[in-house]
Amino acid sequence: MNQAINVEQLNSALSSLRTVRSNVSLVFETLSNGLRADHGEDGKDKFLMELQELLYIVSNNLRDLEQTVNALPIPVPFNLGNTTYLSQETTQDRQALYTQLVNSYKWTDKIHEYSSFAQTLLSQNSLKRSYINSGSTKRRGKLQSNHNVAPLQVDNVINNIDRSYNDMKITISRPFASNAVVSINLSHVLKAVVAFKGLLMEWVMVKGYGETLDLWTESRHHVFRKVTESAHAAMLHFYSPTLPELAVRSFMTWLHSYVNLFSDPCKKCGCHLHHTSLLPPAWRDFRTLEPFHDECKQ
Ligand SMILES: [Zn+2]
């Protein structure tokens, strides 16, 4: 919409420019022709009057042109510094540099614009987990304690959860200084690794029983990639700044429900494999823990 108006304005500015140019050339043409036979007896005065009239028209045209040009929304020019002179370069291969330069400036400009949009959007996002900058001091103190928990306390929480399951083995390691990385073996169904920061779950990766477990490589099986996605959603869903222990426990209960990943049918369509994706139900309801296909969960 805005652009259409701009094009119209640009057109009228260009046509004003054309009028100015054609009338200016008319002035010079008349001037170079000098006195003509049709000027008659007192040709000099008539000639001067004709010239004056033409100049008057030109000055009117010029005013029109100025008005239309001023109405044009002129984009803020890029400040290219000395590199602006590249546009005046005569060597062919260097001329190309100028266009590239302008393009890269446009890109950086866009990146700047988009990142400021992103910044605005993200600052409104309430899903800040580890670092809470806003809120009352009291609340902040409480939240920070979630990722500043002593390793021993984290161990206790996780070992307690481990003891409550026979078919889910949880082991703790600390490859990155004080924060725990927890490996979970769920029966012969799946393996998962959870990175903790204090008592906050920061990252989950789910893999098949036979696969090697690490934090960053995705499973080669579609179904476990789906379960990983669900686990990320669960991790955010169960997140509780005030009751971090409960969050971990709820997440583990939820993850444990995958013990029947390959045996229980979808609660909605009743099938083991979904008729199009051919995947087992890789979603578990957060509350009821019932199995659903991704496509059936709504
Ligand atoms: Zn289904």
Image: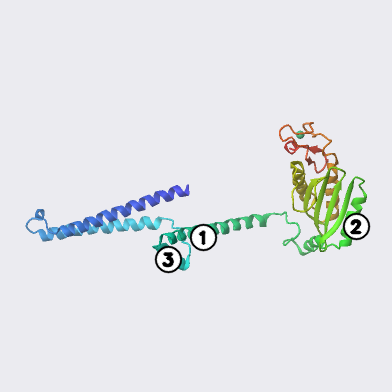
Describe residue 77's horizontal placement relative to residue 208 as left or right. Answer: left
Q: Which residue is mark 3?
A: 85
Q: Which residue is mark 2?
A: 156
| Residue marked by disc 1 | 105
Residue 195 horizontal/vertical position (percent): 80, 55
Q: Is residue 125 left or right of residue 7?
A: right
Q: Quick one: label 1 or label 3, which is nearer the N terminus?
A: 3
Given residues 127 and 181, the one toward you in this image is 181
Q: Quadrant of ligand 1?
A: top right
> Can you tell which quarter of the image residue 176 is in?
bottom right
Q: Nearer the viewer, mark 3 or mark 2?
A: 3
103 with respect to 202 (left or right):
left
Distance in Å between CA atoms under marks 3 and 2: 69 Å
| Residue plotted at (57% across, 57% down) | 111
Q: Who is closer to the viewer here, 167 or 218?
A: 218
Badge number at residue 122: none
Mark 1: few/some/many CA within 10 Å (<14, 14-19, 20+): some
Residue 221 position by quadrant: top right
Quarter of the picture containing the C terminus is: top right
Q: Secondary structure at mark 1?
A: helix
The total of numbered circles placed on residues is 3
The disc labelled 1 sits on which kind of residue?
Tyr
Q: Is residue 297 above or below residue 64?
A: above
Residue 107, given in percent of the width and then of the height, sits at 54, 57
Give the distance between the C-alpha atoms of the residues marked 1 and 3, in whole angstroms.
15 Å
Disc 1 residue lies near ligand 1 with CB under 8 A: no
